[in-house]
Amino acid sequence: MAHPNSFRTRLLAWYDTHARKLPWRAPPRAKKSRDPYRVWLSEIMLQQTRVAAVIEHYREFLRRFPTVEKLASAREASVLAAWSGLGYYRRARMLHAAAKIIVHDLNGQFPATAEGWLALPGIGRYTAAAVASIVFGEAVAVVDGNVERVLQRVSGQRLAGQELWRAAEHLLDPARPGDFNQAMMELGATVCTPRAPACLTCPVVKLCATRGEMPRSAKTPRQNKREIHYALCQTKNGQGSCGDGRPRKPALSDPEHSEGESNGSGGPDVSGRSFGERAVFLVQRPPDARLMAGMWELPEIAQPQNHCKPAFTLRHSITVTDHTVRVWCPPAPPSASGEWILSSRLGRIPLTGLARKILYKAGVIASKEPKLVD
């Protein structure tokens, strides 16, 4: 392993000059403006999600929940709606649960140590160390995918598990632990990349045992392929069809704030009213579902057997599965357990990423990204 002092000096000098300006990041050497709420939120969002995808979601989430107190007092459905588009919704649920503990059990005080952060829901060793070092200056090392790659290339060894953490701790700068940890992650994200690393511009290339020729990681798993079918039923002006042109007056509801008197079908009475907007028929995943519990989506259906063509087809990837998604317009909703949701309410409910993509393609919503309604 490289000599710690030389490695730290080179890496931090590079970081002081080349650190990206990110909305949650304070300038290098900054002693102030390191808000634990914002750093914690960014670290949770960045888990398994690219920086470019996180930035806009981060800003929108903060607009909705600018403080940990606002987040703690919010309804879970509102938090999930704000998280829509980032995926891995368990992160949002754990974030919400931890916010409640910070506000109600810790009197609004954030833990100042990695050990304290580990006691909160949804916080693992990496996140605890990242927040504690960046915000509070605790001398604890971090290991994520980017740091792991840097350590393996610099050492020339197939480090794993506790070996990686020991190597990171060996190099950590105790005087600037937060900047050092961010510099390691920055180096892995922008220079020491998985493919075609920019070794000629690397600040620690002279200390690197491999100069990019690291022990190869395991092969990327082959993508599985799956075809799924969804029913898109929508109305306009209170009259509409799911594809056959027959008028219907659905019960239009807001899953969070139902208004009006019940018509016995699960939504407010709309007789005699005229709605100048669309409504779509959606179903909600069970609260105990293994994935995306409580999220709203279009009803999934079996492939129609009448040999007609789907309204449209799109592609959607989830982890190692590529989905071919075919969207149909059946003559009636395929399920009685769903609800008609006004398009103006869609910003208030947690939609799955695929549902948002379908509704955008169908022209029901104006953006594939969530735009929250206050």
Image: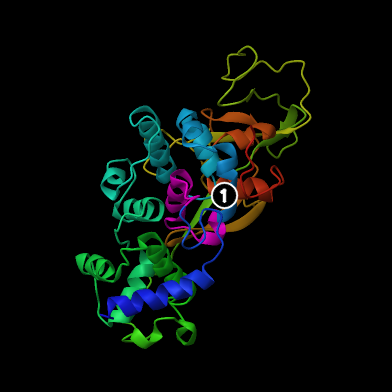
Quarter of the view holding residue 248: top right
Foreground residue among 212 and 293: 212
Foreground residue among 140 and 270: 140
The colouring scheme, among rainbow, by chain, secondary structure or one colour, is: rainbow
Quarter of the view holding residue 82: top right
Q: Is residue 259 above or below residue 115?
A: above
Which residue occupies 57% across, 49% down?
A: 57
Q: How many tags in the picture?
A: 1
Which residue occupies 54% across, 44% down?
A: 84
Which residue occupies 60% across, 57% down?
A: 314
Return the residue at label 1: 57
Q: Where residue 21 appears, x then y in whole percent?
A: 56, 62
Query: Is most of the magenta stretch helix, strand or loop?
Result: helix
Q: Where residue 235 appears, x then y in whole percent?
A: 71, 33
Q: Split into 4 quadrants, where in the image is the C terminus? A: top right
Q: Split into 4 quadrants, where in the image is the N terminus? A: bottom left
Q: Where residue 245 appears, x then y in whole percent?
A: 75, 35
Amino acid type at image mark 1: His
**From where the camera sits, is residue 364 visible?**
yes
Residue lying at the far top of the rendered structure: 261
Q: Where residue 215 appears, x then y in whole percent?
A: 30, 81
Q: Is residue 332 above or below residue 291?
A: above
Per the rendered image, the range of residues in magenta is 32-54
Foreground residue among 149 and 69: 69
Q: Residue 134 in magenta?
A: no
Q: Indicate the secondary structure of the residue bearing disc 1.
A: helix
